[in-house]
């Protein structure tokens, strides 16, 4: 498993991200918590082949702007 923390730049970006993250939750690929415009996302390697780079590319392909929080 790995964890990524990120903050969406606007409320509309946050809502868009939440829609597809909820789809991933339904497939049992990820869990996430959210607060304000931030997400803490946990990717389950044992359930998915998703890699961090692929995940971030997906955000970019969907025109979702975010800031990674390390």
Image (cartoon, grey):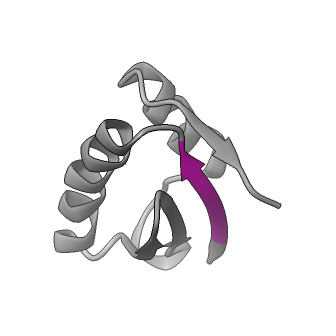
At horizontal 35% and vertical 25% (from top left) the residue drawn is 62
- Is 5 included in the stretch rendered in magenta? yes
x, y (%) of residue 16? Answer: 26, 41
Pick the front one: 28 or 62: 62
Horizontal relation, residue 14 to residue 46: left or right: left
13 vs 32: above or below: above
Q: Which segment did they paint magenta?
A: 3-8
At horizontal 20% and vertical 51% (from top left) the residue drawn is 19
At horizontal 36% and vertical 48% (from top left) the residue drawn is 14
On-image quarter of the C terminus: bottom right
22 vs 8: above or below: below
x, y (%) of residue 22? Answer: 22, 63
- Is 60 included in the stretch rendered in magenta? no
On-image quarter of the N terminus: bottom right
x, y (%) of residue 60? Answer: 50, 25
Pick the front one: 63 or 37: 37
Pick the front one: 6 or 44: 6
x, y (%) of residue 23? Answer: 18, 59
Report which quarter residue 47 is drawn in.
Answer: bottom left
Q: What is the magenta segment's predominant secondary structure? A: strand
At horizontal 42% and vertical 21% (from top left) the residue drawn is 61
Pick the front one: 49 or 62: 62
Q: How many marks?
A: 0
Report which quarter residue 53 is drawn in.
Answer: top right
Horizontal relation, residue 29 to residue 27: left or right: right
């Amino acid at each position: 498993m790995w964890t990524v923390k990120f903050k969406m730049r606007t409320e509309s970006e946050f809502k868009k991200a939440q829609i597809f993250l909820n789809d991933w939750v339904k497939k049992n690929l990820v869990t996430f918590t959210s607060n304000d415009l931030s997400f803490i996302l946990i990717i389950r390697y044992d359930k998915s082949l998703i890699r961090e780079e692929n995940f971030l590319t997906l955000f970019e392909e969907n025109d979702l702007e975010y800031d990674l929080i390390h």
